[in-house]
């Protein structure tokens, strides 16, 4: 039973990773791409790692998978925010269809 659940987490995680890759290709600007890849790939990679933990249990591999999940959940949003803020400060334009620019509003 646990093998089926672990495999399910891995397959769902792979699906989220694929959606993140599609978003990276299809979305119009840096900011939309960052959102798609950060959210999908974080959830996808955490799903794969949690599936690995379920399959392996509390051995060295399982504990490393759990620690990697914690590390990924702490660093991925911070890195995406730093990249988006750096892109905005360096003058990368938003897509023409963007509704608002919160960074520009904060400068006023």
Image (cartoon, grey):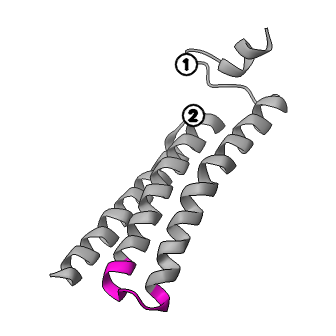
Residue placed under numbered mark 2 in the picture: 28
Q: Is residue 97 above or below residue 70?
A: above
Q: CA distance from mark 1 to mark 2?
A: 9 Å
Taking the spot 65% from the left edge, 18% from the top edge, the residue there is 101
Residue 92 at x, y = what percent? 76, 31
- 66 and 31: which one is in front? 66
Look at the image and give the residue range highlighted in magenta: 52-61
| Residue 55 shown in magenta | yes
Residue placed under numbered mark 1 in the picture: 97
Q: Residues within 10 Å of mark 1 (few under 14, many from 20)?
A: few
Q: Quadrant of residue 4?
A: bottom left
- Tell me the SS state at disc 2: loop
Q: Is residue 39 above or below residue 58?
A: above
Q: Is residue 101 above or below residue 69?
A: above
Give the left or right position of residue 46, taking residue 5 as reference: right
Is the magenta region chiefly helix, strand or loop? helix
Taking the spot 34% from the left edge, 72% from the top edge, the residue there is 10
Q: Residues within 10 Å of mark 2 (few under 14, many from 20)?
A: some
Residues at marks 1 and 2 touching, judged by CB atoms closer than 8 Å: yes
């Amino acid at each position: 039973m646990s093998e089926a659940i672990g495999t399910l987490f891995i397959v769902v995680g792979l699906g989220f990773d694929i959606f993140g890759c599609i978003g990276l290709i299809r979305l119009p600007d840096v900011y939309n791409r960052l959102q798609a890849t950060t959210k999908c790939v974080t959830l996808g990679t955490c799903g794969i790692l949690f599936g690995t933990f379920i399959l392996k249990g509390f051995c060295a591999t399982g504990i490393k998978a759990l620690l990697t999940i914690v590390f990924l959940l702490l660093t991925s949003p911070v890195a995406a925010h730093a990249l988006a803020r750096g892109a905005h400060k360096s003058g990368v334009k938003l897509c023409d269809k963007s509704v608002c620019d919160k960074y520009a509003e904060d400068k006023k």
